[in-house]
Amino acid sequence: MARTRGTRRARRERRLAQRSRDAMRALTAGALSLPGLGHGASAESAPLEIRSDYRYSRYAEDPLPSSNLAAGSEDRYEIDIHQFSFEAPLGDALDLGIDINHETMSGASPWYVTPGASPGDDPEQVMTAATISETRTDALVSGRFYGESTRTDIAGGFSVENDYQALNLSLGVERDFDEKHTTLSGGIGGSFDDIEPSDTDQYPERVRSEKKETYDVFVGLSQVIGRSTTAQTSVKLAHATGFLSDPYKQAFVVSAPLSDARPDDRNQLAWLTRLRHHFGRVDGTVHLDYQYYVDDWEINSHTLELAWYQQLFERVSLIPSLRYYSQSQAYFYAPFYTSARSDGLRSSDYRLSPFGALSYRLEAEAKIHTGDFAWLLTAGWERYTSRADLALGSVSVENPGLVSYELYTVGLSARF
Protein backbone atom coordinates (compact mmCIF):
# COMPACT_ATOMS: atom_id res chain seq x y z
CA MET A 1 0.00 0.00 0.00
CA ALA A 2 2.87 2.38 0.80
CA ARG A 3 4.26 1.81 -2.69
CA THR A 4 0.89 2.66 -4.25
CA ARG A 5 0.55 5.85 -2.22
CA GLY A 6 4.08 6.88 -3.11
CA THR A 7 3.38 6.39 -6.81
CA ARG A 8 0.22 8.48 -6.63
CA ARG A 9 2.04 11.24 -4.74
CA ALA A 10 4.82 11.33 -7.33
CA ARG A 11 2.28 11.64 -10.13
CA ARG A 12 0.53 14.54 -8.37
CA GLU A 13 3.87 16.32 -7.88
CA ARG A 14 4.70 15.94 -11.56
CA ARG A 15 1.30 17.38 -12.50
CA LEU A 16 1.85 20.37 -10.22
CA ALA A 17 5.27 20.96 -11.74
CA GLN A 18 3.81 20.78 -15.24
CA ARG A 19 1.28 23.53 -14.52
CA SER A 20 4.11 26.07 -14.47
CA ARG A 21 4.79 25.15 -18.10
CA ASP A 22 1.18 25.58 -19.27
CA ALA A 23 1.84 28.97 -20.88
CA MET A 24 4.65 27.55 -23.04
CA ARG A 25 2.54 24.53 -23.94
CA ALA A 26 -0.24 26.84 -25.09
CA LEU A 27 2.23 28.54 -27.39
CA THR A 28 3.09 25.32 -29.17
CA ALA A 29 -0.22 23.42 -29.01
CA GLY A 30 -2.40 22.85 -32.04
CA ALA A 31 -1.82 21.97 -35.66
CA LEU A 32 1.88 21.06 -35.59
CA SER A 33 1.57 18.33 -38.15
CA LEU A 34 5.00 18.21 -39.77
CA PRO A 35 7.21 15.39 -38.46
CA GLY A 36 9.44 16.55 -35.66
CA LEU A 37 7.40 19.68 -34.94
CA GLY A 38 4.52 18.11 -33.07
CA HIS A 39 6.06 18.12 -29.62
CA GLY A 40 6.62 21.75 -28.87
CA ALA A 41 9.62 24.00 -29.19
CA SER A 42 12.17 21.56 -27.81
CA ALA A 43 13.04 17.89 -27.85
CA GLU A 44 11.58 17.70 -24.32
CA SER A 45 12.06 14.69 -22.06
CA ALA A 46 10.41 11.29 -22.07
CA PRO A 47 6.77 11.36 -20.90
CA LEU A 48 6.18 9.98 -17.42
CA GLU A 49 2.55 8.97 -17.83
CA ILE A 50 0.56 6.63 -20.05
CA ARG A 51 -1.56 8.44 -22.61
CA SER A 52 -4.61 7.14 -24.44
CA ASP A 53 -6.71 9.08 -26.95
CA TYR A 54 -9.89 8.39 -28.90
CA ARG A 55 -11.52 10.71 -31.41
CA TYR A 56 -14.62 10.26 -33.56
CA SER A 57 -15.31 12.50 -36.56
CA ARG A 58 -18.22 12.74 -38.95
CA TYR A 59 -17.37 14.22 -42.36
CA ALA A 60 -20.28 15.13 -44.64
CA GLU A 61 -19.99 16.78 -48.04
CA ASP A 62 -22.78 19.01 -49.29
CA PRO A 63 -24.95 17.54 -52.07
CA LEU A 64 -23.94 18.73 -55.51
CA PRO A 65 -26.23 21.56 -56.68
CA SER A 66 -28.66 20.27 -59.29
CA SER A 67 -27.59 23.08 -61.65
CA ASN A 68 -24.06 21.57 -61.70
CA LEU A 69 -25.21 17.98 -62.27
CA ALA A 70 -25.23 16.32 -65.70
CA ALA A 71 -25.80 12.73 -64.52
CA GLY A 72 -25.39 10.50 -61.48
CA SER A 73 -26.22 11.16 -57.84
CA GLU A 74 -26.26 14.51 -56.07
CA ASP A 75 -25.26 12.83 -52.79
CA ARG A 76 -21.55 13.02 -52.05
CA TYR A 77 -19.26 11.39 -49.52
CA GLU A 78 -20.11 10.83 -45.88
CA ILE A 79 -17.28 9.41 -43.78
CA ASP A 80 -17.18 8.09 -40.23
CA ILE A 81 -13.68 8.31 -38.77
CA HIS A 82 -12.43 6.56 -35.64
CA GLN A 83 -8.96 7.48 -34.36
CA PHE A 84 -7.22 5.75 -31.46
CA SER A 85 -3.72 6.30 -30.08
CA PHE A 86 -1.82 4.87 -27.14
CA GLU A 87 1.58 5.95 -25.80
CA ALA A 88 3.54 4.53 -22.86
CA PRO A 89 7.03 5.16 -21.45
CA LEU A 90 9.53 2.33 -21.27
CA GLY A 91 12.17 3.49 -18.82
CA ASP A 92 13.59 7.01 -18.68
CA ALA A 93 14.66 7.41 -22.31
CA LEU A 94 12.14 5.56 -24.47
CA ASP A 95 8.44 5.56 -25.17
CA LEU A 96 6.40 3.55 -27.66
CA GLY A 97 3.19 4.53 -29.36
CA ILE A 98 0.55 3.12 -31.66
CA ASP A 99 -1.99 5.00 -33.75
CA ILE A 100 -4.95 3.33 -35.47
CA ASN A 101 -7.45 5.04 -37.77
CA HIS A 102 -10.52 3.39 -39.28
CA GLU A 103 -12.75 5.08 -41.84
CA THR A 104 -16.06 4.01 -43.35
CA MET A 105 -17.22 6.02 -46.33
CA SER A 106 -20.24 5.97 -48.62
CA GLY A 107 -21.82 8.14 -51.29
CA ALA A 108 -21.00 9.34 -54.80
CA SER A 109 -17.84 10.81 -56.27
CA PRO A 110 -17.14 13.19 -59.18
CA TRP A 111 -16.40 11.19 -62.34
CA TYR A 112 -15.85 13.59 -65.26
CA VAL A 113 -16.98 17.01 -66.50
CA THR A 114 -18.93 17.63 -69.71
CA PRO A 115 -19.44 20.86 -71.68
CA GLY A 116 -22.70 22.66 -71.14
CA ALA A 117 -25.72 21.76 -73.24
CA SER A 118 -25.29 24.90 -75.35
CA PRO A 119 -22.21 26.95 -76.32
CA GLY A 120 -21.38 29.38 -73.54
CA ASP A 121 -23.12 27.31 -70.84
CA ASP A 122 -21.18 26.36 -67.73
CA PRO A 123 -19.71 22.84 -67.68
CA GLU A 124 -21.58 20.15 -65.75
CA GLN A 125 -20.40 17.36 -63.47
CA VAL A 126 -21.07 13.69 -64.11
CA MET A 127 -21.17 11.86 -60.78
CA THR A 128 -21.01 8.16 -60.00
CA ALA A 129 -24.03 6.45 -58.51
CA ALA A 130 -24.41 6.76 -54.73
CA THR A 131 -23.33 3.16 -54.26
CA ILE A 132 -19.67 3.62 -53.28
CA SER A 133 -18.97 1.92 -49.97
CA GLU A 134 -15.40 1.64 -48.73
CA THR A 135 -13.40 1.14 -45.56
CA ARG A 136 -9.83 2.09 -44.76
CA THR A 137 -7.63 1.13 -41.82
CA ASP A 138 -4.32 2.82 -41.00
CA ALA A 139 -1.91 1.68 -38.30
CA LEU A 140 1.35 3.32 -37.20
CA VAL A 141 3.86 2.10 -34.61
CA SER A 142 6.45 4.59 -33.35
CA GLY A 143 9.35 4.68 -30.97
CA ARG A 144 10.88 7.82 -29.45
CA PHE A 145 14.36 7.85 -27.96
CA TYR A 146 15.31 10.74 -25.68
CA GLY A 147 18.84 11.93 -25.10
CA GLU A 148 20.14 14.82 -23.04
CA SER A 149 19.36 17.34 -25.79
CA THR A 150 18.02 15.17 -28.63
CA ARG A 151 15.00 13.13 -29.56
CA THR A 152 14.85 10.50 -32.31
CA ASP A 153 11.57 9.27 -33.77
CA ILE A 154 11.29 6.04 -35.74
CA ALA A 155 7.93 5.03 -37.17
CA GLY A 156 6.45 2.46 -39.51
CA GLY A 157 2.90 1.79 -40.59
CA PHE A 158 0.51 0.55 -43.20
CA SER A 159 -2.79 1.52 -44.79
CA VAL A 160 -5.28 -1.00 -46.16
CA GLU A 161 -8.33 -0.45 -48.38
CA ASN A 162 -10.19 -2.84 -50.63
CA ASP A 163 -8.23 -1.51 -53.62
CA TYR A 164 -5.16 0.09 -52.06
CA GLN A 165 -2.34 -0.95 -49.77
CA ALA A 166 0.52 1.22 -48.55
CA LEU A 167 3.58 0.79 -46.36
CA ASN A 168 5.30 3.85 -44.86
CA LEU A 169 8.49 4.43 -42.87
CA SER A 170 9.97 7.57 -41.32
CA LEU A 171 12.91 8.79 -39.25
CA GLY A 172 13.07 12.15 -37.48
CA VAL A 173 15.61 13.84 -35.21
CA GLU A 174 15.42 16.94 -33.00
CA ARG A 175 18.29 18.66 -31.21
CA ASP A 176 18.10 21.47 -28.66
CA PHE A 177 20.49 24.40 -28.40
CA ASP A 178 20.79 27.49 -26.23
CA GLU A 179 19.16 25.94 -23.12
CA LYS A 180 16.26 24.57 -25.20
CA HIS A 181 15.39 27.97 -26.65
CA THR A 182 16.35 26.75 -30.14
CA THR A 183 15.47 23.41 -31.71
CA LEU A 184 16.72 22.11 -35.04
CA SER A 185 14.77 19.21 -36.55
CA GLY A 186 14.97 17.08 -39.65
CA GLY A 187 13.73 13.82 -41.06
CA ILE A 188 13.10 11.53 -43.99
CA GLY A 189 10.17 9.33 -44.97
CA GLY A 190 8.89 7.03 -47.64
CA SER A 191 5.63 5.42 -48.74
CA PHE A 192 5.27 2.39 -51.03
CA ASP A 193 1.78 1.91 -52.46
CA ASP A 194 0.05 -0.86 -54.38
CA ILE A 195 -3.04 0.14 -56.37
CA GLU A 196 -5.56 -2.49 -57.52
CA PRO A 197 -8.73 -0.72 -58.70
CA SER A 198 -12.07 -2.47 -58.33
CA ASP A 199 -14.75 -3.08 -60.99
CA THR A 200 -12.19 -3.60 -63.76
CA ASP A 201 -14.55 -6.16 -65.31
CA GLN A 202 -17.18 -3.42 -65.77
CA TYR A 203 -14.61 -0.77 -66.77
CA PRO A 204 -11.88 -2.53 -68.79
CA GLU A 205 -10.13 0.80 -69.47
CA ARG A 206 -9.05 0.93 -65.83
CA VAL A 207 -5.61 -0.27 -64.88
CA ARG A 208 -5.59 -3.58 -63.03
CA SER A 209 -2.49 -3.15 -60.89
CA GLU A 210 -0.02 -0.27 -60.44
CA LYS A 211 2.56 1.00 -57.96
CA LYS A 212 3.50 4.37 -56.55
CA GLU A 213 6.42 5.52 -54.39
CA THR A 214 6.77 8.75 -52.43
CA TYR A 215 9.89 10.04 -50.67
CA ASP A 216 10.15 13.15 -48.55
CA VAL A 217 12.71 15.05 -46.50
CA PHE A 218 12.25 18.03 -44.19
CA VAL A 219 14.26 20.41 -42.04
CA GLY A 220 12.83 22.77 -39.42
CA LEU A 221 13.84 25.37 -36.87
CA SER A 222 11.95 26.35 -33.70
CA GLN A 223 12.83 29.38 -31.61
CA VAL A 224 11.60 30.65 -28.25
CA ILE A 225 11.40 34.45 -28.43
CA GLY A 226 11.03 35.68 -24.88
CA ARG A 227 8.59 34.32 -22.30
CA SER A 228 5.49 34.65 -24.44
CA THR A 229 6.41 34.03 -28.08
CA THR A 230 7.66 31.13 -30.18
CA ALA A 231 8.25 30.80 -33.91
CA GLN A 232 8.78 27.82 -36.19
CA THR A 233 9.74 27.47 -39.82
CA SER A 234 10.26 24.34 -41.90
CA VAL A 235 10.77 23.24 -45.48
CA LYS A 236 9.60 19.90 -46.84
CA LEU A 237 10.57 18.37 -50.18
CA ALA A 238 8.73 15.39 -51.66
CA HIS A 239 9.18 13.29 -54.78
CA ALA A 240 6.48 10.93 -56.07
CA THR A 241 6.94 8.49 -58.91
CA GLY A 242 4.89 5.73 -60.49
CA PHE A 243 1.16 5.70 -61.14
CA LEU A 244 -0.03 9.17 -60.06
CA SER A 245 -3.30 9.22 -62.02
CA ASP A 246 -6.71 8.57 -60.47
CA PRO A 247 -7.99 5.23 -61.85
CA TYR A 248 -11.60 6.13 -61.03
CA LYS A 249 -11.74 9.49 -62.82
CA GLN A 250 -12.07 10.42 -66.47
CA ALA A 251 -11.69 13.53 -68.62
CA PHE A 252 -13.98 14.50 -71.50
CA VAL A 253 -11.86 14.83 -74.66
CA VAL A 254 -13.50 16.13 -77.87
CA SER A 255 -16.63 13.94 -77.73
CA ALA A 256 -16.05 11.13 -75.19
CA PRO A 257 -14.63 10.54 -71.71
CA LEU A 258 -11.15 8.98 -71.44
CA SER A 259 -9.18 7.72 -68.46
CA ASP A 260 -7.47 10.28 -66.22
CA ALA A 261 -3.78 10.55 -67.27
CA ARG A 262 -1.18 12.49 -65.24
CA PRO A 263 2.64 12.65 -65.30
CA ASP A 264 4.54 9.74 -63.76
CA ASP A 265 6.62 12.05 -61.53
CA ARG A 266 5.87 14.92 -59.20
CA ASN A 267 8.25 17.12 -57.21
CA GLN A 268 6.78 19.20 -54.39
CA LEU A 269 8.02 21.86 -51.99
CA ALA A 270 6.19 23.23 -48.95
CA TRP A 271 7.44 26.04 -46.73
CA LEU A 272 5.60 26.46 -43.43
CA THR A 273 6.02 29.23 -40.84
CA ARG A 274 4.22 29.44 -37.49
CA LEU A 275 4.02 32.09 -34.81
CA ARG A 276 2.60 31.72 -31.29
CA HIS A 277 2.11 34.56 -28.81
CA HIS A 278 0.58 34.24 -25.37
CA PHE A 279 -1.31 37.16 -23.78
CA GLY A 280 -1.02 36.64 -20.05
CA ARG A 281 -3.61 39.22 -19.01
CA VAL A 282 -6.43 37.41 -20.82
CA ASP A 283 -4.82 33.93 -20.67
CA GLY A 284 -5.17 33.54 -24.42
CA THR A 285 -2.80 32.55 -27.20
CA VAL A 286 -2.85 33.54 -30.85
CA HIS A 287 -1.68 31.04 -33.49
CA LEU A 288 -0.72 32.34 -36.92
CA ASP A 289 0.34 29.88 -39.66
CA TYR A 290 1.33 30.46 -43.27
CA GLN A 291 2.29 27.83 -45.85
CA TYR A 292 3.48 28.27 -49.40
CA TYR A 293 3.40 25.23 -51.69
CA VAL A 294 4.70 24.71 -55.23
CA ASP A 295 5.24 21.69 -57.50
CA ASP A 296 6.38 20.90 -61.03
CA TRP A 297 2.77 20.35 -62.12
CA GLU A 298 2.68 24.17 -61.88
CA ILE A 299 0.35 24.20 -58.89
CA ASN A 300 1.18 26.79 -56.28
CA SER A 301 -0.91 27.51 -53.22
CA HIS A 302 -1.13 29.75 -50.19
CA THR A 303 -2.62 28.73 -46.83
CA LEU A 304 -3.17 31.23 -44.03
CA GLU A 305 -4.67 30.17 -40.68
CA LEU A 306 -5.50 32.25 -37.63
CA ALA A 307 -6.59 30.66 -34.35
CA TRP A 308 -7.20 31.88 -30.81
CA TYR A 309 -6.74 29.56 -27.80
CA GLN A 310 -8.72 31.04 -24.91
CA GLN A 311 -8.38 29.55 -21.42
CA LEU A 312 -11.52 29.76 -19.25
CA PHE A 313 -11.84 28.81 -15.58
CA GLU A 314 -8.44 27.01 -15.69
CA ARG A 315 -9.91 23.79 -17.12
CA VAL A 316 -11.88 24.90 -20.18
CA SER A 317 -10.52 26.18 -23.50
CA LEU A 318 -12.33 27.63 -26.51
CA ILE A 319 -10.52 27.62 -29.85
CA PRO A 320 -12.07 29.51 -32.77
CA SER A 321 -10.06 29.48 -36.00
CA LEU A 322 -10.24 30.70 -39.58
CA ARG A 323 -8.31 29.29 -42.54
CA TYR A 324 -7.97 30.63 -46.09
CA TYR A 325 -6.58 28.62 -49.02
CA SER A 326 -5.96 29.43 -52.67
CA GLN A 327 -4.31 27.45 -55.47
CA SER A 328 -3.56 27.67 -59.18
CA GLN A 329 -4.24 24.84 -61.62
CA ALA A 330 -2.05 22.01 -62.90
CA TYR A 331 -0.63 22.78 -66.34
CA PHE A 332 -2.45 19.83 -67.94
CA TYR A 333 -5.81 20.40 -66.19
CA ALA A 334 -8.96 21.48 -68.03
CA PRO A 335 -12.67 21.11 -67.22
CA PHE A 336 -12.94 19.39 -70.63
CA TYR A 337 -10.79 19.24 -73.77
CA THR A 338 -11.86 20.43 -77.22
CA SER A 339 -8.76 18.69 -78.61
CA ALA A 340 -6.35 16.11 -77.25
CA ARG A 341 -3.05 17.30 -75.78
CA SER A 342 0.07 16.29 -77.68
CA ASP A 343 1.60 14.80 -74.50
CA GLY A 344 -1.44 12.61 -73.82
CA LEU A 345 -2.06 14.14 -70.37
CA ARG A 346 -5.55 15.00 -69.16
CA SER A 347 -7.43 15.49 -65.91
CA SER A 348 -10.61 17.30 -64.88
CA ASP A 349 -10.19 16.51 -61.18
CA TYR A 350 -11.41 19.50 -59.17
CA ARG A 351 -8.44 19.06 -56.83
CA LEU A 352 -6.15 20.11 -59.71
CA SER A 353 -8.33 23.08 -60.70
CA PRO A 354 -7.86 26.72 -59.66
CA PHE A 355 -9.99 27.65 -56.65
CA GLY A 356 -10.04 29.24 -53.24
CA ALA A 357 -11.46 27.93 -49.98
CA LEU A 358 -12.50 29.32 -46.64
CA SER A 359 -13.07 27.29 -43.48
CA TYR A 360 -13.96 28.24 -39.95
CA ARG A 361 -13.84 26.03 -36.92
CA LEU A 362 -14.83 26.12 -33.27
CA GLU A 363 -13.36 23.66 -30.79
CA ALA A 364 -13.81 23.29 -27.04
CA GLU A 365 -11.70 21.40 -24.52
CA ALA A 366 -12.42 20.53 -20.89
CA LYS A 367 -10.00 19.02 -18.36
CA ILE A 368 -11.29 16.69 -15.63
CA HIS A 369 -9.23 15.09 -12.84
CA THR A 370 -10.46 11.94 -11.09
CA GLY A 371 -8.00 10.27 -8.75
CA ASP A 372 -4.92 9.27 -10.71
CA PHE A 373 -6.60 9.96 -14.05
CA ALA A 374 -6.56 13.23 -15.99
CA TRP A 375 -9.22 13.42 -18.72
CA LEU A 376 -9.50 15.79 -21.64
CA LEU A 377 -12.85 16.10 -23.42
CA THR A 378 -12.92 17.76 -26.85
CA ALA A 379 -15.66 18.73 -29.27
CA GLY A 380 -15.34 20.58 -32.56
CA TRP A 381 -17.21 21.75 -35.62
CA GLU A 382 -15.81 22.95 -38.95
CA ARG A 383 -17.41 24.43 -42.05
CA TYR A 384 -15.44 24.38 -45.34
CA THR A 385 -16.47 26.08 -48.58
CA SER A 386 -14.56 26.18 -51.88
CA ARG A 387 -15.35 28.40 -54.89
CA ALA A 388 -13.54 29.87 -57.86
CA ASP A 389 -14.25 33.45 -56.74
CA LEU A 390 -12.34 32.82 -53.50
CA ALA A 391 -9.09 32.27 -55.42
CA LEU A 392 -6.39 34.93 -55.39
CA GLY A 393 -6.21 34.97 -59.19
CA SER A 394 -9.03 35.15 -61.69
CA VAL A 395 -10.62 31.84 -62.73
CA SER A 396 -12.28 31.79 -66.15
CA VAL A 397 -14.25 28.55 -65.64
CA GLU A 398 -15.14 27.11 -62.24
CA ASN A 399 -14.97 23.34 -61.87
CA PRO A 400 -18.55 22.17 -61.12
CA GLY A 401 -17.30 19.47 -58.74
CA LEU A 402 -15.77 21.72 -56.07
CA VAL A 403 -16.55 20.43 -52.60
CA SER A 404 -18.00 21.99 -49.47
CA TYR A 405 -18.42 20.05 -46.24
CA GLU A 406 -19.03 20.04 -42.50
CA LEU A 407 -16.92 18.14 -39.98
CA TYR A 408 -18.05 17.23 -36.44
CA THR A 409 -15.58 15.83 -33.92
CA VAL A 410 -15.69 14.55 -30.34
CA GLY A 411 -12.77 13.12 -28.41
CA LEU A 412 -11.63 11.74 -25.08
CA SER A 413 -8.05 11.61 -23.81
CA ALA A 414 -6.74 10.02 -20.62
CA ARG A 415 -3.45 10.39 -18.71
CA PHE A 416 -2.64 8.01 -15.90
Image (cartoon, rainbow, N blue to C red):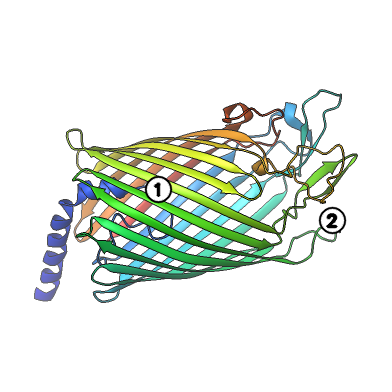
Q: Does residue 321 show up?
A: yes
Q: Amino acid at mark 2?
A: Tyr
In front: 63, or 184? 184
Q: Which mark is residue 31?
A: 1
The answer to whether 31 is drawn above or below residue 244 in the figure is above
Q: Which mark is residue 203?
A: 2
Structural distance between the alpha carbons of marks 1 and 2? 41 Å
Few, some or many C-alpha atoms within 10 Å of disc 2 (few <14, some 14-19, many ≥20)?
A: few
Q: Quadrant of residue 395?
A: top right
Quadrant that contains the N terminus: bottom left
The answer to whether 330 is drawn above or below residue 245 in the figure is above
Q: Disc 1 on helix, strand or loop?
A: loop
Q: Position of residue 325 (x, y in %)?
A: 52, 37
Give the side of residue 338 with respect to residue 394, left or right: right
Q: Position of residue 4 (x, y in %)?
A: 14, 72
Q: Position of residue 366 (x, y in %)?
A: 28, 44
At 40% from the left and 41% from the top, the residue drawn is 289
Q: Amino acid at mark 1?
A: Ala
Which is in the foreground here, disc 1 or disc 2? Answer: 1
